[in-house]
Image (cartoon, rainbow, N blue to C red):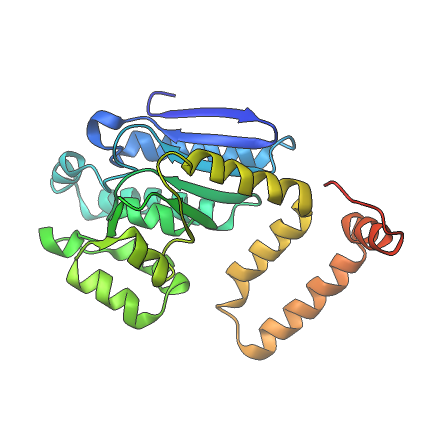
Amino acid sequence: MNYIQYQVSDRIAFVTLNRPEKRNALSHELVSELQVAFQQASEDDAVKVVVLRSNGEAFCAGADLGYLQKLQQFSYEENVADSNHLKQLFLQIYTLNKVVIAQIQGHALAGGCGLAAVCDFSFSVPEAKFGYTEVKIGFIPAIVMVFLLRRMSEGKSKQLLLSGDLISAEEAQQVGLINYLSSKESLQNDVLTFANRLISSNSGQSMATTKQMIAAVQSMSLAEALQYASEMNAKARASEDCQRGIAAFLNKEKLIW
């Protein structure tokens, strides 16, 4: 891999954007390498949590504008294929069978802000800025809005998507775009502490199933969602993890997952 670094340590897969000279902009090649890395983490039984992070000053500046300019010469069908390429990455992260934590050490803009938003948890330094700037260059925040509207209220989403304005990390936390603020000095340690708590305290199977259900129920009717939930509830009761967890609780045993 040229634009991504991948390593596994203590049940955590670290996926690191490594294109700092371009502020980790999303080129076709970088997106492809991210897809490979997340697929690798998904299939690795030794991995329970994924941390997405970046080298350099910016977390991710969004789409590579030079690449976007080239795409203007492509056919409509070629542009649809390229758009689907990015869509598949966002959907892959959103539905991954492992918890994904974004470690945001710098600005997350446009598609980069979308990348942060599809992660399950996010830690950011206070100095980082967030925003969807596409409308300022005549583009649209098309794919990112689908996921943003699932994460935040329509009103706050409209404010970001239509204004193109940047907001502080503190405001991003207030509107629910990110979860936690950490100083530059403590960011890495805070992410590792949180990841290790999930690893030791929670069933990986339970987190995967819960994440799967969160993605699925929002497109169902109330009746469909409740029926689906009842069926998943019944399946969970029969799972090895549930049996093990309940037995440990009743026997007052400390369970390390």
The residue at the point 67 percent across, 52 percent down is 206
Q: In which quarter of the image is the N terminus?
A: top left
Number of numbered markers = 0
Name the foreground residue: 145 vs 248: 248
| Residue 77 spot, x, y in % from top left | 24, 46
| Residue 135 spot, x, y in % from top left | 14, 56
Residue sitting at the far top? 2
Residue sitting at the far right? 251
In the rendered image, which quarter is residue 65 located in?
top left
The residue at the point 17 percent across, 57 percent down is 165
240 left or right of 197?
A: right
Q: Is residue 120 above or below residue 49?
A: below
Name the foreground residue: 9 vs 112: 9
120 left or right of 198?
A: left
Name the foreground residue: 208 vs 174: 174
Q: In which quarter of the image is the C terminus?
A: top right
Q: Is residue 107 above or below residue 171?
A: above
